[in-house]
């Protein structure tokens, strides 16, 4: 019993002597979505890939027209051109699939590169904020509950926006 009492006494004494810990929380998704740098870069990527998107849509419409033509030939009595048209259709569909996949991969790579740059900017800003405002711990990501006092997401957004001016 004396051991438990001594342990409890030591525990309460050490807690009373310890300093308060300054903790912050950041919602990274909110930071990213509110950064003008991110939104401008996403718009730029979209504009850059818009011509290819339109080209693929035109190719898709052409494939649909060819598919209709093949169906009409198949329903008709004269089927001389059916095999040739089916070959054209298969070739165009494969080309469309490959181009779409290539285009999507290229666009995704650009977006991933952008997110990595934005993430580095956010991390640098968090480190600067933590040092300048004496934070002991800053959490980044999901949390069940975060008080307004602990949530420093807005501070991070404002600091990054000031850096970009």
Image (tube, helix red, strand yellow):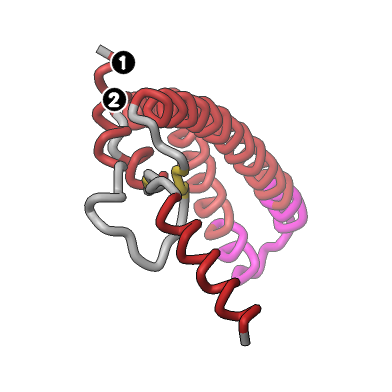
**Is 83 a magenta residue?**
yes
Of 132 and 145, nearer the camera is 132
Q: Secondary structure at mark 2?
A: helix
Rendered location of residue 86, percent (x, y)? 71, 55
Left or right: 123 in relation to 153: right
Circle 2/circle 1 CB separation < 8 Å: yes
Rendered location of residue 151, percent (x, y)? 30, 49
| Residue at the image position 27 percent from the left and 23 percent from the top | 161
Circle 1: is it few (<14), some (14-19), or many (20+) Cα within 10 Å?
few
Dominant secondary structure of the magenta stretch?
Answer: helix
The range drawn in magenta is 69-89
**Is 133 a magenta residue?**
no
Quadrant in the picture for the N terminus? bottom right
Rendered location of residue 47, percent (x, y)? 38, 26
Left or right: 115 in relation to 79: left
| Residue at the image position 38 percent from the left and 31 percent from the top | 134
Q: Which residue is mark 1?
A: 163
Of 17 and 135, nearer the camera is 17
- Cα separation, mark 2 vs mark 1, equals 6 Å
Quarter location, residue 128: top left
Q: Which residue is mark 2?
A: 159
| Residue at the image position 46 percent from the left and 48 percent from the top | 139
Residue 157 visible here:
yes
| Residue at the image position 26 percent from the left and 34 percent from the top | 155
Rendered location of residue 165, percent (x, y)? 24, 12
Residue 50 visible here:
no
């Amino acid at each position: 019993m004396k051991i438990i009492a001594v342990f409890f006494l030591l525990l309460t004494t050490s807690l009373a002597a310890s300093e308060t810990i300054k903790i912050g929380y950041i919602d990274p998704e909110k930071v990213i979505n509110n950064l003008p740098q991110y939104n401008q870069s996403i718009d730029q990527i979209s504009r850059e890939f818009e011509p290819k998107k339109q080209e693929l849509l035109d190719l898709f419409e052409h494939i649909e027209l060819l598919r209709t033509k093949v169906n009409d030939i198949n329903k008709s009595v004269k089927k001389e051109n059916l095999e040739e048209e089916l070959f054209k259709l298969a070739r165009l569909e494969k080309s469309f699939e490959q181009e779409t996949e290539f285009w999507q991969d290229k666009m995704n790579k650009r977006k991933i590169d952008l997110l990595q740059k934005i993430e580095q900017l956010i991390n640098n800003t968090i480190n600067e904020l933590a040092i300048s405002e004496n934070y002991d711990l800053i959490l980044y990501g999901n949390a069940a509950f975060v008080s307004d006092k602990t949530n420093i997401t807005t501070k991070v957004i404002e600091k990054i926006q000031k850096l970009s001016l």
